[in-house]
Amino acid sequence: MVSILVLVLGTGVASAAQLELVTIDGSTERQIPARIRLRCADGQDIVPPGAVEVPVRDDRWFVTSGTVRLELPVGEIEIRVERGKEYIPVKERLTLGADGLTRHQISVRRWIDMQARGYLSGENHIHIAPTDLPAVLAAEDLNYGSSLYWWNGPKIPLSEGPEPVRTMSFGGITIPASVFDAEVEGDWGPAYLIGLQEPLPPDVDPSRPNLFYLIEGRRQGALLCYNSGWAVESLFDALAGYVEVVDVCNNLFYRHRFAPRKGYSNLLGVEGLTVHEETPRGMFQMNLDAYYRLLNCGLQIAAGADSAVGAKATPAGYNRAYVRRPAGASLGEFLDGWRQGRNFVTNGPMLFLTAGDAAPGDTLSAPGEGQTIEFRVQAISNEPLESLELIANGRVVATAQQGIGGREATLVHKLSVRESTWVAARCADREMLLSEEELERYRRPPGKPREEPCRLRFAHTSPIYATVAGSPVHVASSIEEARRILDAFERFAEKKCGDRYRQELRQHLEAARSRLR
């Protein structure tokens, strides 16, 4: 499929060349929104006045859907065009002369159609006002949106009207988005409430644990998410029954870079927990270990994805969830499918897990003596795959050999299930779009929070659950870690929790311990 975008801008540059960029969908003949970067020979990025801008590190990208003609300096320009995860990024150079108008066509080719496969996309961490949100969502080919207007109190002006879900349009594309969503972030850790039916009160009390915001979110039917399983309060809230999604593909990873944060692996200072290497693989494993610990305690929690666009310089949906839902599903149906774990998350490759007719979010019941179950995994990417693995109760039980190094790999494994087990899949690839010199531009200079160049991209499914004789998953080593984390959280809460919340928090702590027992 070919996509075309037509641009018309004016810069008023002396000795300027006239350029018209044109993109068109080869099958439908309609214009499609996209994210564009135009870089002149002097390194300056040109952004048209009034365009919705999307920073990516120090790069200045913008969104457009219409016909644009622009003036640029005579000479060579670099053009980059991107549209979400299902289209191959375009990167090319063009030399402009001063003699007349140059018309140039950009082809953006779809390498996979996830909607045709029964999947729709969204994420849970977007700090963009409703005025700019439609352009940002449409340019990244997201099917659903959200706006975290409340971030430790109101931060983004609300558009008029009581409707919690707004139908937004840009470039001929219609996208439903929830606009009363909230992020609670502070000493207790970042949690997201997606799909709230009404705005939270404006008052904020730092001594109030996240749990009480999540309880309100449950009352309103919101999707209850945590940025990570290593967040200070996440394990406690999960054991209390108020966490439905934990982000495995989270905002430690941005477009072309990652944030080394090894100290995050043990924010409560629990003795004996792993401290991970400050590498892309190390930070990915840090996210995984914390998520697996929750699953190993018998909790059924979906894998999540967040990008923090609006707070971080990265595109919306760089990390995203693909949920099994038919085209035309409502936003509520999409969030409910995510809540049920009928999804995978990714910042690059696509990943599919099945066991017969079962898929992520489903539960298989086995008799007391257990049974053997065949699992099938397929990874597809537009870049070379580096790994494909099947995970059971936190352990790698099978690794693909065929297809690694190519763009498609398949893994089939018969697993003997003798105790209740969760089974998920993960894969990784290596993006080769940029040269080493180009990639180095994304390293953050000293004196600021570290960000380093990154080629790693990955995907992870939510689990399929296989229960034996109706028992929950029970991994002793993870439960022992969880007990020590709960003890450390209790010490933390005694210092941080306000008196008005203390008694109820203690009741939930006792319930969390009972669940572990």
Image (tube, helix red, strand yellow):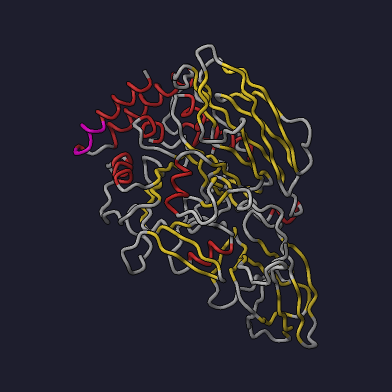
Query: Bounds of the magenta span?
Result: 500-505
- Vertical relation: 191 (above or below) 415: below
- Residue placed most toward the observer, 441 or 94: 94
Q: Residue furthest front?
A: 357
- Report the quarter where the N terminus lies: bottom right
- Vertical relation: 230 (above or below) 193: above
- Say if the magenta span includes residue 501: yes
Residue at left offset 50%, top offset 13%: 368
Is residue 463 visible in the rendered image? The answer is: yes
- Report the quarter where the C terminus lies: top left
Circle count:
0
Kindly report the secondary structure that dominates the magenta region of the rendered protein: helix
Residue 440 appears left or right of 345: right
**The image quarter in which residue 208 lies:** top left
Residue 456 appears left or right of 147: right
Q: Position of residue 154 (x, y in %)?
A: 33, 59
- Say if the magenta span includes residue 310: no
Q: Position of residue 114 (x, y in %)?
A: 63, 51
**The image quarter in which residue 402 lies:** top right
Residue at left offset 67%, top offset 43%: 456
- Vertical relation: 59 (above or below) 121: below
Is residue 287 visible in the rendered image? The answer is: no
Q: Position of residue 481 (x, y in %)?
A: 45, 22
Residue at left offset 62%, top offset 65%: 35
Residue at left offset 35%, top offset 65%: 158
Q: Position of residue 88 (x, y in %)?
A: 71, 57
- Residue placed most toward the observer, 220 or 490: 220
Q: Residue furthest top?
A: 369
